[in-house]
Image (spheres, helix red, strand yellow):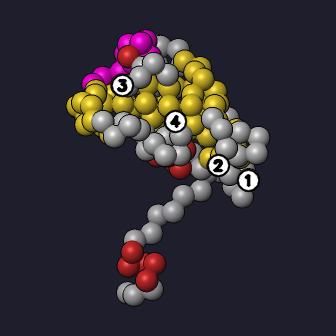
Amino acid sequence: MGLVRTSIQISNPRRSDLHPIEVDALVDRGALHLCIPQHVALQLDLEELEKREVTMADGSRKIVAYVGPIRTSFRNRSCYTGGMVLSDEVLLGTIPMDDMDLVVRPASRDIVPNPLNPNIPASVAMSAREQSGSR
């Protein structure tokens, strides 16, 4: 499929006096979280909420800062999430992508709002009990 990149906007919802930052993000459906470089966390004055241990693509483990909240926006979609301070580029993982109901188009190597839900993001919110039909 090759690498997929997209432009997203990230901001600190606690600091309305700071302008959002437009960043080029690597889209990775194999990753879970939003990952941001240290300089982005500093520019947005994001608070470190805790430390987290993350597993890297090569299997190694690393302790990193988990910061937030972060408002992530793509076209007519947005979500609130935390971010791992890691690496030198922004990585858009599955959690924010699913929260915004975005899909990857492998042929054109881009992402778009889910065509089945072009105006309002959709999500699944049912318990296992509801899925099985028992009451």
| Chain-order first, disc 3 or disc 4 | 3
| Chain-order first, disc 2 or disc 4 | 4
Judge the density around disc 3: few (<14), some (14-19), many (≥20) Cα neighbours within 10 Å: many
Horizontal arrangement in the rendering, residue 84 relative to residue 63 (left or right):
right
| Chain-order first, disc 2 or disc 1 | 2
Q: CA distance from mark 1 to mark 4?
A: 20 Å
Q: CA distance from mark 2 to mark 3?
A: 24 Å
In the rendered structure, are the residues bearing label 2 and label 1 in contact, judged by CB atoms less than 8 Å apart?
Answer: yes
Q: Which of the two marks, 2 or 1, is nearer to us in this view?
A: 2
* Up/down of 30 relative to 123, above or below: above
Q: Please give the label number shown on residue 115.
A: 1
In the rendered structure, are the residues bearing label 2 and label 4 in contact, judged by CB atoms less than 8 Å apart?
Answer: no
Q: CA distance from mark 1 to mark 3?
A: 32 Å
Residues rendered magenta in the picture: 39-50
Q: Which of the two marks, 1 or 3, is nearer to us in this view?
A: 3
Q: Amino acid at mark 4?
A: Leu
Magenta-span inclusion, residue 40: yes
Name which residue lies at 39% across and 75% down: 128
Residue 64: percent from left, percent from top: 28, 28
Mark 4 secondary-structure assignment = strand
Mark 3 secondary-structure assignment = strand
Say which quadrant the N terminus sits in. top right
Name which residue lies at 45% across and 42% down: 31
Q: Amino acid at mark 1?
A: Pro
Q: Which residue is mark 3?
A: 85
In the rendered structure, are the residues bearing label 2 and label 3 in contact, judged by CB atoms less than 8 Å apart?
Answer: no
* Farthest residue, direction front: 58
Count of marks, rendered view: 4
* Farthest residue, direction right: 108
Q: Which residue is mark 4?
A: 92
| Chain-order first, disc 1 or disc 4 | 4
* Up/down of 44 relative to 82, above or below: above
